[in-house]
């Protein structure tokens, strides 16, 4: 009983120690493109920070932009977060470009480090190209209204939010404070917390005043708990690029094609299957257009059929057209702006066109070439009369003894040429003199 009592006392002391451990400021770092993996990471970090009782979550941001659907998901999570989210564009030299502009505007507190920039939020295609025509105008109008609504909800500069989209405006940290795009400039995390202290923000419809005394140590420094991205999210972060997903799909299909046409090599099949599975994982989180995917697969099927059918490039040309159209329509650009870079599409298409021409030329050449094997391959073969043919006898053709007959007498040792094959008997004639 005495031992049990000591054990219970130790458990109570440990429990008290854990309960008495002061909370820390939650922090995540986003350094790269905004994509579905990053959106999942932010969503999970907000829930984790709220469960840990953190006074706020600091989202340290440095991004050139990213996918609009992922940006919208992050903005929705920040606006509905159960705890304050402080978006901090840092370190010096970093930027909140394009998608990062909307994420910064959505923060309960928005701050920037000296030497950073924000803006240039005009929507572009997946390869950085301008989206022209009615589609481009449609996406531009939607993106501008998206930025304006965020700025209005957070009480920030609505006009500048629209200009950042329509005119691709980009400003420095000091200009952002002057134009009321962000709240202040902070040198580091300690300075950020000091300047955010006492601010009142709207968290889920409730006014809340920020206090960070509990997360400071005896020296006045902020205790920080940094959340890292999981390995699965890191892999998806790399794969969730439409260009990488497209290349992986092409590599997978090529590897499987080589394995099916040359069974037993093993490596192309294994590598192709891995690439194809990775591509499917990426396509699972990207806005795929089903019609574009079907067109692309149809094009690949026709290109493969061209290698086996004597169509002299007709099926291959149709497959190339279907492949290019499917590649261009692979992602739902009308709603998201996501697309494979056209330079990549036409580069792959040009490579396939050369492949088709080479295969077509080889097939045509092989069909014009005289047969070397079987009954047809024996026609025209030259041998030697083993004995006098008058008209029957034996000849040697390609190192083999054959029974032969001739319409004329041929002396032993004379060259003969095969004119026909009848069962196991050759019909021959005297061979013409050849150089």
Image (cartoon, rainbow, N blue to C red):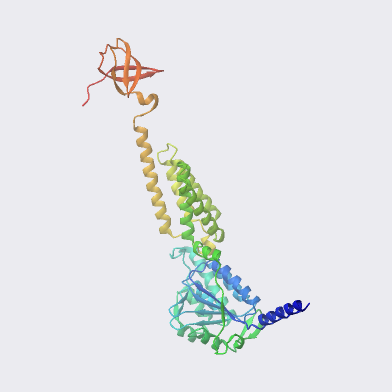
**From the image, which quarter does the C terminus lie in?**
top left
Q: Quick one: which residue is furthest to the front in this view?
A: 2
In the rendered image, residue 234, in percent from the top left (x then y), is placed at: 52, 66
Identify which residue, 120 or 365, lies in the foreground. 365
In the rendered image, residue 303, in percent from the top left (x then y), is placed at: 45, 45
In the rendered image, residue 144, in percent from the top left (x then y), is placed at: 52, 73
Which residue sits at x=40%, y=58%? 343
Identify which residue, 374 or 217, lies in the foreground. 217
Q: How many marks?
A: 0
**From the image, which quarter does the N terminus lie in?**
bottom right
As drawn, is 388 to the left or to the right of 171?
left
In the rendered image, residue 381, in percent from the top left (x then y), is placed at: 31, 24
Q: Is residue 271 above or below residue 88?
A: above
Which residue sits at x=56%, y=74%? 227
* Residue 339 in sight: no
Q: Quick one: which residue is furthest to the right in this view?
A: 1
Which residue sits at x=33%, y=19%? 419
* Residue 229 in sight: yes
As drawn, is 103 to the left or to the right of 417?
right
Q: Quick one: which residue is furthest to the left in this view?
A: 435
Which residue sits at x=68%, y=79%? 14
Q: Is residue 299 above or below residue 115?
A: above
Identify which residue, 20 or 150, lies in the foreground. 20
């Amino acid at each position: 009983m005495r031992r049990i009592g000591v054990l219970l006392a130790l458990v109570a002391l440990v429990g008290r120690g854990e309960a008495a451990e002061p909370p820390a400021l939650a922090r995540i770092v986003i350094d790269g493109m905004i994509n579905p993996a990053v959106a999942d990471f932010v969503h999970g970090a907000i829930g984790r920070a709220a469960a840990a009782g953190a006074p706020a979550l600091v989202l340290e941001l440095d991004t050139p932009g990213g996918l609009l659907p992922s940006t919208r998901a992050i903005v929705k999570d920040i606006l509905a977060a159960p705890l304050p989210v402080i978006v901090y564009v840092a370190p010096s030299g970093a930027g909140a470009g394009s998608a990062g502009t909307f994420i910064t505007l959505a923060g309960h507190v928005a701050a920037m480090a000296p030497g950073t920039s924000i803006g240039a939020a005009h929507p572009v295609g997946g390869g950085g190209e301008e989206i022209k025509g009615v589609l481009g105008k449609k996406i531009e109008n939607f993106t501008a209204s998206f930025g304006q609504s965020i700025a209005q909800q957070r009480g920030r500069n609505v006009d500048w939010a629209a200009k950042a989209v329509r005119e691709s405006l980009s400003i420095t940290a000091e200009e952002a404070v002057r134009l009321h795009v962000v709240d202040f400039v902070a040198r580091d995390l300690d300075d950020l917390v000091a300047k955010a202290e006492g601010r009142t923000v709207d968290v889920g419809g409730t006014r809340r005043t920020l206090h960070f005394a509990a997360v400071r140590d005896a020296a006045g420094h902020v205790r920080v708990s940094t959340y890292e991205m999981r390995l699965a999210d890191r892999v998806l972060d790399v794969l969730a690029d439409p260009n990488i997903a497209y290349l992986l799909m092409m590599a997978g299909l090529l590897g499987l094609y080589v394995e099916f046409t040359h069974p037993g090599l093993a490596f192309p099949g294994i590598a192709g299957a891995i690439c194809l599975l990775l591509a499917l994982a990426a396509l699972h989180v990207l806005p795929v257009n089903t019609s574009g995917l079907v067109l692309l697969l149809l094009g690949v099927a026709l290109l493969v059929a061209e290698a086996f059918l004597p169509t002299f490039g007709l099926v291959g040309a149709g497959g190339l057209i279907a492949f290019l159209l499917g590649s261009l329509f692979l992602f739902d650009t009308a709603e998201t702006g996501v697309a494979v870079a056209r330079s990549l599409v036409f580069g792959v298409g040009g490579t396939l066109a050369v492949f088709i021409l080479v295969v077509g030329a080889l097939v045509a050449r092989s069909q014009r070439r005289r047969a070397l094997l079987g009954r047809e391959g024996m026609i025209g073969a030259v041998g030697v009369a083993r004995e006098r043919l008058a008209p029957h006898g034996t000849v040697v053709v390609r190192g083999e003894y054959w029974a032969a007959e001739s319409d004329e007498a041929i002396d032993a040792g004379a060259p003969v040429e095969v004119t026909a094959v009848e069962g196991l008997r050759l019909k021959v004639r005297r061979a013409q003199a050849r150089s």
